[in-house]
Image (cartoon, rainbow, N blue to C red):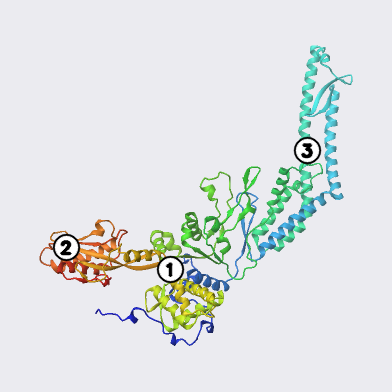
C-alpha cells in the first residue's frame, strides 16, 4: 500500500550514541577480511584441493578488496607449504639448441653452479701442469721414438730398393718422389733421351715397380702416423683423465642422489677429454684477435650453469603477482645478443617468467590484462593442461625473424593460478571458452554489500582503524564514523546494507584526514567527512551543474507549478564514471483516433533502448486489457521524452508514461511539482 514517506525514512541516520568509544584510536586494528564470507569459503576450498583444473577465479567489482584479500590468503597458505626446488638449464652436448633442465633441491642450484665453475677452473689449471710434467714428456718421447724408428726403417728400406734399381728417393713438399740416378747423380732429361730402346724399356719398368713399392711404403707410413696419433691421443686422454679424475669424482659423489647431475658431470668430463687443446695455454705468438677471444669465451660458456629459479632464500611456497602478464613475462625467453652483426643465443641467456618463479606456489594474474595478450592466455591454458612450462620464441613462430632459436626442455609445472577480474568476464569465458571451465573450476565471488548491523559496523570501523594506523591518518570521532557508515550505505543504495567496496570508503577517509590536517584538527570530524564527500562530488559534477543551469535558465523546459493534462515530470539517472545523478525530464503524451495503438517516439527515432521498449509494450498491453477487452482499441497514442537527444533506456519510467497517457485520455491534470519514477508491475 502506497504512503507518504517521512523524512527520516528516506535516509537512515546512524545513531552514534550506541558506540562505546570516542575515536577509532581506542579500537584494536582488524586483521581479517570482512563481508566476504562466500568468497573466503571458496578461496579456502580452492587452495586446499590439490586436483587438476581447480584453479581460482576471483570475481567482483573493483574496490571490493579482491586483490588484497586473495594476496593475504595466498601468503597465509604459502607459509604452511614447503619451499619448491631450484631449476637450472645446462648445455646439451648432443644438440646445443635443446638445453636440458635440471631440478635441484632448494638451495642446491647455487652450490651446483659454484662447484661447476670451480671444476672448470681446476681443470684449466691441472691439465697444462700435467702436460708439462717430466713424466708426460718421457712417455711422449718414448712413444714418438718408437714411431720415428718405424718410419726411418721403412724409408731406409725403400731407399735401398731404389738404389739397386738405379733410383733415389727424395723428400718434397708433396711427399716422397722417385728420382733416377746415373753414377750417383740425378739423371737429366738428355740422359734419359740417350737411352737405347731396350734400356729405356728396362728403365720404365724399373721406375714403375719402384713407384709401386713407394706407394706401399707411403701407405705403411700413413698407418704408422695414424697409429701414432691414436696412441698419442690415448696417452693424452689417460694423462688428462688421471689429472682431473679426483675433481670429477668428488663432484659426482657430492651430487650422487641426483642422477641427472651425475650424468651431466660425466658428459662434461667426456667433452673435456675430447677438447684437450682448448685447455692448453696459448703461445705468446698466437693471435689474440677479438674473434679469437670471443671463440674462447664461447667455448667455455657451455660448461656454465644457468640458474633459472633460485629458491635458496624462500620460506614457504612462493606467491607471485604478475600485473603485466605478457607471454614473455609469464613464460620467460631466450635472449639474443649481436656479435659481428649476427644474432645468437645459448642456454645461458634463458630468462625465467612468472610461471617459473611461482612454480610450486601461487600466481595471481589480472584477467583483463591477460586477455589483452592472446598468446599469453592460450599458452597459460596449455601449460596448465600439460603440467609443464615451455619457452618458445614468439618472434620465430610468427615469422618476424628467421634466426634459429632455442627449444629448451620443458619444466614440470605444479601451481595454483588465481585470476582476478569482474563477473562479466567470468561469464563470457565460462560460456565461450571450453578450456576455461575445465581449468578454473573454483569461483570466489566477492560481494559489494553486507548487512548493516552492530557486529559488521564494529568490524568495519576496526578495519578503518587499521588503515589509519598503517597510513598514519588521523583517527575518526564518533560523529565522523556515523558519516562514514551513512556514506557507505549510500554507495550501495540500501539503508540496511553497507558497502564492501572498502577502497572507495577509505579514499573518503584519506581525503577527510587531509582536510583535518589542514585545519590543524586532532581528529577527523563529521565536518571533514562531509567536506571530503562534497569535494569528491564537486570534482565530478560539472555536467550535473550545467544541466541544472539549463533548467534554471529555461533552456531545458519543465514545469514545477500548476497542473497539466498529458504532461508529467519523470526522473532520469545519468551516470558519468564515478558520479550518478538524477534529473527531471518532461514526458508528454498525445492521444487521437486511430489504429496505431501506442507509439513510442523514442523507439521510432532509434533513441530508445530495448528495456525502455519493453516497458512501453507492457503499457500497451495494460491499455488493451483495460479498454479493448472485447473491442478494438481505436486510438493512436504517442509518447515522447521532451528535449531528449542522447537516448533513453530502462523501464523505470513506464509508470510515469502510463500516468501521462491516462491523464491525456481522461482529461484529468497532473500536478507538475511532483516528479515520478517506477516501473509497471
Kind of element beneath mark 2: strand
Quadrant of the image occupied by residue 575: bottom left
Q: Distance between the residues labelled 2 and 3?
A: 118 Å
Task: Mark 2 or mark 1: name the one nearer the start of the chain.
Answer: 1
Where is mark 2, residue-wise?
A: 591
Horizontally, is 500 left or right of 466 in the view? left
Task: From this view, report whether residue 71 is shown above or below residue 21.
Answer: above
User: Relative to the observer, which residue lies in front, 317 or 64?
Assistant: 64
User: Residue at coordinates 77% horizontally, 47% vertically from top-left?
Assistant: 234
What label sits on residue 538 in the rendered view? 1
User: Relative to the observer, which residue lies in front, 160 or 511?
Assistant: 511
Give the crowd class for mark 2: few <14, some 14-19, many >=20 residues within 10 Å.
some
Horizontally, is 556 left or right of 45 in the view? left
Quadrant of the image occupied by residue 671: bottom left
The answer to whether residue 479 shows anywhere in this view is: yes
The answer to whether residue 467 shows anywhere in this view is: no
Residues at discs 2 and 3 in contact (Cβ within 8 Å): no
Quadrant of the image occupied by residue 643: bottom left
Q: Nearer the viewer, mark 2 or mark 1?
A: 1
Residue 309 in percent (x, y) is at 62, 61
Where is mark 3, residue-wise?
A: 225
Give the crowd class for mark 1: few <14, some 14-19, many >=20 residues within 10 Å.
few
Q: Residue furthest left?
A: 631
Horizontally, is 410 left or right of 618 in the view? right
Q: Quadrant of the C terminus?
A: bottom left
User: Relative to the observer, which residue lies in front, 629 or 486?
Assistant: 486
User: Residue at coordinates 31% horizontally, 59% vertically from top-left?
Assistant: 647
Residues at discs 1 and 3 in contact (Cβ within 8 Å): no
Amino acid at each position: 500500500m502506497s504512503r507518504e514517506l517521512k523524512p527520516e525514512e528516506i535516509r537512515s541516520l546512524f545513531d552514534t550514541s550506541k558506540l562505546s568509544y570516542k575515536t577509532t584510536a581506542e579500537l584494536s586494528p582488524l586483521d581479517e577480511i570482512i563481508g566476504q564470507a562466500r568468497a573466503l569459503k571458496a578461496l579456502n576450498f580452492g587452495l586446499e584441493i590439490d586436483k587438476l583444473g581447480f584453479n581460482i577465479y576471483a570475481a567482483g567489482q573493483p574496490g571490493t578488496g579482491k586483490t588484497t584479500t586473495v594476496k593475504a590468503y595466498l601468503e597465509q597458505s604459502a607459509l604452511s607449504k614447503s619451499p619448491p626446488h631450484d631449476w637450472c638449464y645446462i648445455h646439451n652436448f648432443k644438440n646445443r639448441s635443446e638445453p636440458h633442465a635440471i631440478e635441484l633441491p632448494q638451495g642446491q642450484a647455487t652450490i651446483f653452479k659454484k662447484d661447476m665453475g670451480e671444476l672448470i677452473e681446476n681443470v684449466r689449471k691441472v691439465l697444462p701442469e700435467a702436460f708439462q710434467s717430466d713424466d708426460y714428456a718421457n712417455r711422449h718421447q718414448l712413444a714418438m721414438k718408437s714411431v720415428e724408428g718405424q718410419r726411418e726403417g721403412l724409408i731406409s728400406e725403400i731407399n735401398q730398393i731404389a738404389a739397386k734399381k738405379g733410383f733415389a728417393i727424395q723428400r718434397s713438399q708433396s711427399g716422397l718422389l722417385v728420382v733416377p740416378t746415373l753414377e750417383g747423380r740425378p739423371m737429366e732429361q738428355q740422359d734419359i733421351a740417350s737411352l737405347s730402346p731396350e734400356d729405356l724399356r728396362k728403365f720404365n719398368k724399373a721406375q714403375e715397380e719402384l713407384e709401386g713399392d713407394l706407394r706401399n711404403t707411403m701407405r705403411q707410413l700413413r698407418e704408422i702416423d695414424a697409429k701414432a696419433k691414436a696412441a698419442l691421443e690415448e696417452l693424452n686422454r689417460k694423462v688428462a683423465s688421471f689429472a682431473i679424475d679426483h675433481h670429477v669424482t668428488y663432484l659426482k659423489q657430492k651430487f650422487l642422489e641426483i642422477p641427472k647431475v651425475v650424468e651431466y658431470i660425466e658428459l662434461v668430463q667426456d667433452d673435456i677429454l675430447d677438447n684437450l687443446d682448448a685447455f692448453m695455454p696459448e703461445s705468446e705468438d698466437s693471435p689474440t684477435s677479438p674473434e679469437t677471444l670471443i671463440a674462447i669465451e664461447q667455448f667455455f660458456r657451455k660448461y656454465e650453469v644457468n640458474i633459472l629459479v633460485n629458491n635458496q632464500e624462500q620460506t614457504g611456497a612462493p606467491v607471485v603477482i604478475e600485473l603485466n602478464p605478457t607471454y614473455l613475462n609469464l613464460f620467460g625467453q631466450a635472449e639474443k645478443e649481436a656479435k659481428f652483426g649476427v644474432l645468437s643465443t645459448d642456454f645461458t641467456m634463458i630468462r625465467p617468467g612468472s610461471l617459473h618463479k611461482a612454480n610450486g606456489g601461487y600466481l595471481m594474474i589480472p584477467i583483463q590484462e591477460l586477455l589483452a595478450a592472446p598468446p599469453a592466455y592460450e599458452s597459460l591454458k596449455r601449460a596448465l593442461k600439460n603440467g609443464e612450462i615451455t619457452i618458445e620464441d614468439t618472434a620465430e613462430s610468427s615469422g618476424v625473424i628467421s634466426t634459429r632459436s632455442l627449444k629448451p626442455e620443458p619444466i614440470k609445472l605444479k601451481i595454483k593460478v588465481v585470476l582476478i577480474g569482474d563477473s562479466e568476464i567470468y561469464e563470457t569465458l565460462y560460456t565461450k571458452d571450453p578450456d576455461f571451465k575445465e581449468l578454473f573450476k573454483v569461483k570466489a565471488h566477492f560481494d559489494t554489500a553486507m548487512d548493516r548491523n552492530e557486529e559488521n559496523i564494529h568490524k568495519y570501523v576496526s578495519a578503518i582503524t587499521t588503515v589509519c594506523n598503517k597510513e598514519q591518518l588521523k583517527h575518526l570521532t564518533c560523529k565522523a564514523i556515523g558519516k562514514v557508515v551513512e556514506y557507505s550505505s549510500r554507495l550501495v543504495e540500501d539503508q540496511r546494507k553497507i558497502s564492501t567496496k572498502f577502497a572507495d570508503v577509505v579514499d573518503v577517509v584519506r581525503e577527510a584526514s587531509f582536510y583535518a590536517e589542514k585545519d590543524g584538527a586532532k581528529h577527523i570530524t563529521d565536518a571533514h567527512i562531509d567536506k571530503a564527500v562534497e569535494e569528491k562530488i564537486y570534482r565530478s559534477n560539472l555536467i550535473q551543474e550545467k544541466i541544472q543551469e539549463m533548467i534554471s535558465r529555461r533552456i531545458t523546459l519543465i514545469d514545477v507549478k500548476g497542473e497539466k493534462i498529458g504532461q508529467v515530470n519523470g526522473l532520469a539517472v545519468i551516470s558519468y564514471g564515478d558520479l550518478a545523478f538524477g534529473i527531471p525530464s518532461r514526458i508528454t503524451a498525445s492521444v487521437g483516433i486511430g489504429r496505431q495503438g501506442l507509439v513510442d517516439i523514442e523507439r521510432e527515432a532509434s533513441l530508445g533502448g530495448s528495456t525502455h521498449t519493453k516497458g512501453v509494450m507492457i503499457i500497451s498491453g495494460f491499455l488493451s486489457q483495460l479498454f479493448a477487452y472485447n473491442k478494438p482499441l481505436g486510438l493512436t497514442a504517442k509518447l515522447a521524452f521532451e528535449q531528449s537527444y542522447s537516448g533513453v533506456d530502462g523501464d523505470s519510467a513506464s509508470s510515469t508514461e502510463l500516468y501521462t497517457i491516462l491523464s491525456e485520455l481522461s482529461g484529468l491534470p497532473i500536478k507538475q511539482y511532483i516528479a515520478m519514477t517506477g516501473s509497471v508491475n
